[in-house]
Image (spheres, rainbow, N blue to C red):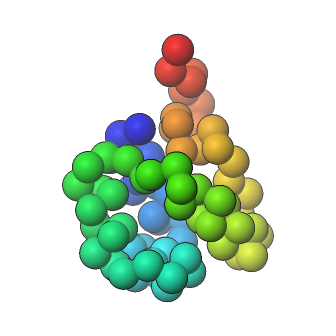
């Protein structure tokens, strides 16, 4: 994963504060993901579910690559 993927997912929610509230983690957790350039897989199901509640479709692929790019081998 990379910082652009973290930023894209965060933007889909309207920012770090909104995402953190949606999945019930501190905002500093989201900031750390951005700094490290990845979202730990244990959070993916909660983020996907929170996105679905907002009628945004996310899948595991969205955590691995940017739209329009090939998945890493």
Q: Position of residue 32 (x, y in %)?
A: 27, 62
Q: Is residue 9 left or right of residue 27?
A: right
Between 38 and 13, the one nearer to me in the picture: 38
Between 4 and 46, the one nearer to me in the picture: 46
Residue depicted at x 39% and y 56%: 7
- Considering only vertical position in the picture, is 12 above or below 37? below
The quarter of the displayed image where residue 30 is located: bottom left
> How many numbered dots are placed on residues in this image?
0
Q: Position of residue 23 (x, y in %)?
A: 55, 76
Question: Can residue 51 be seen in the rendering of this structure?
Answer: no
In the picture, the quarter occupied by the N terminus is: top left
Residue depicted at x 31% and y 46%: 37
Residue depicted at x 44% and y 52%: 40
The quarter of the displayed image where residue 10 is located: bottom left
- Considering only vertical position in the picture, is 49 above or below 23? above
Q: Is residue 48 left or right of residue 55?
A: left
Question: Can residue 2 be seen in the rendering of this structure?
Answer: yes
Q: Position of residue 16 (x, y in %)?
A: 39, 74
Q: Can you name the residue that lies furthest to the top here?
A: 73
Q: Can you name the residue that lies furthest to the left here?
A: 35
Residue depicted at x 73% and y 57%: 57
Q: Position of residue 55 (x, y in %)?
A: 76, 70
- Considering only vertical position in the picture, is 72 above or below 26? above
């Amino acid at each position: 994963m990379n910082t652009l993927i973290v930023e894209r997912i965060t933007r889909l929610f309207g920012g770090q504060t909104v995402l953190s509230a949606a999945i019930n983690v501190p905002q500093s957790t989201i900031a750390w993901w951005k700094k490290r350039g990845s979202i730990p897989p244990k959070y993916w199901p909660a983020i996907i579910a929170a996105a679905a509640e907002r009628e945004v479709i996310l899948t595991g692929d969205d955590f691995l690559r940017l739209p329009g790019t090939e998945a890493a081998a």
